[in-house]
Amino acid sequence: MRDDGAGLGLAFISAAAFGTSGSLAASLLASGWSSAAAVLLRISIGAAVLTVPAVLQLRGQWSRFGRRLRSLSLYGLLAVGGGQLCYFNAVRHMSIAVALLVEYSGTLLVVAWVWLRSGERPTRLTLAGAVLAIAGLVPVLDLTGPQRVDAVGLAWAGAAAVGLAVYFVLSARAETGLPGTVLAWAGMGLGAVEVGAAALVGAVPFAVSGSPVRLAGHPVSWLVPILGLSLVACAFAYLLGIAAARRLGARLGSFVAMTEVLFATGFAWLLLGQRPTGLQVAGGLVVLAGIALVRAGEPAAPRTDLADARAASPAQVALAGVVGPDRAAAMDAAAPGV
């Protein structure tokens, strides 16, 4: 069996960290912030926090960074900045729940990509689990009520789904030769430039407010949700997400990440007083059942990129940020929406 026990733990913790973003961002939006402003500060501060460890890990070998500029650009512009911009544009035209469902359909794009790229055809269990997990999101997102949908919103949400797929595909590629910290740092930096440019030209509304926000029924400074978004739901969440994807692979990692919606529901109850309904809880159980089927349908043999990492020297393993079950190496990414 593949060494995915630790990978699953990292993936669940990452999903929980990402799941805090909805409640934290909602408190800012309610006090007058725009989504773009919250995202820009979120990824800018996240990038700033990771700057020193990322530069130290590069050890002056900036040529390695340059050789991977194409992958880093795709990661920053599509997976980090572009995905969030597309999602926020989608919710300007349609209901948030529908936009989230369409965005998370990006997991199916990951399944298709792995099949086309590696020839690893999904098993029946994987396909059944995929359908079950996405179906479970319907009650969790409360899609049974009236929803607002239009073609423009669907197009933006579809683009966000592509960004989600790019995130998992590139995060899982240990053979890029870059530590997870460097990948996350560069992605956030490029994403911040993209969001800032979009706000500057008026592509997305941009507004901030110094008013206190409410969390868990108490007024707090706006710095509290901003720091939570930046440190927990960005830097910490991305780092663990990358580490998890490199252990689990893009396909399984993307489906485990669906639990972000379940964690987000729990945090909305805890921080905003939005208690989930019985139907939402049942939907969450269906999502978990679907993830279990996807995991059961995964091949027993290690993924090619993980197998290559195990065959590599310890220095190469450390550089890639991947740890094999039979090798003691440092995982640089162990230390990855609204």
Image (cartoon, helix red, strand yellow):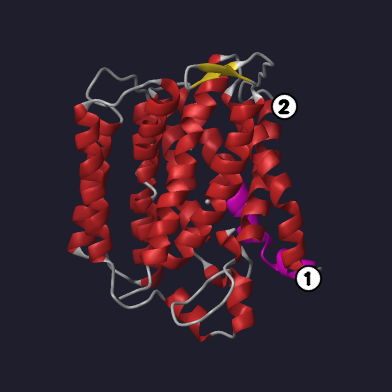
Q: Position of residue 293 (x, y in %)?
A: 21, 58
Q: Position of residue 263 (x, y in %)?
A: 38, 39
**Residue at position x 21%, y 50% from top?**
289
Which residue position holds label 1?
Answer: 61
User: Quarter holding the N terminus?
Assistant: bottom left
**Residue at position x 56%, y 34% from top?**
85
Q: Is residue 264 above or below residue 176?
A: above
Image depth: mark 1 or mark 2 in front? 1
Magenta residues? 61-77
Q: Is residue 282 left or right of residue 184?
A: left
Nearest the camera: 307 or 46? 46
Majority secondary structure in the magenta region: helix
- Asked if residue 71 lies in the magenta stretch, the reply is yes
Nearest the camera: 44 or 235? 235
* Residue 338 seen: no
Q: CA distance from mark 1 to mark 2?
A: 33 Å
Which residue position holds label 2?
Answer: 200
Q: Position of residue 2 (x, y in %)?
A: 35, 74
**Residue at position x 62%, y 28% from top?**
224
Q: Amino acid at mark 2?
A: Leu
Q: Is residue 109 above or below residue 69?
A: above
Residue found at the far right of this picture: 60
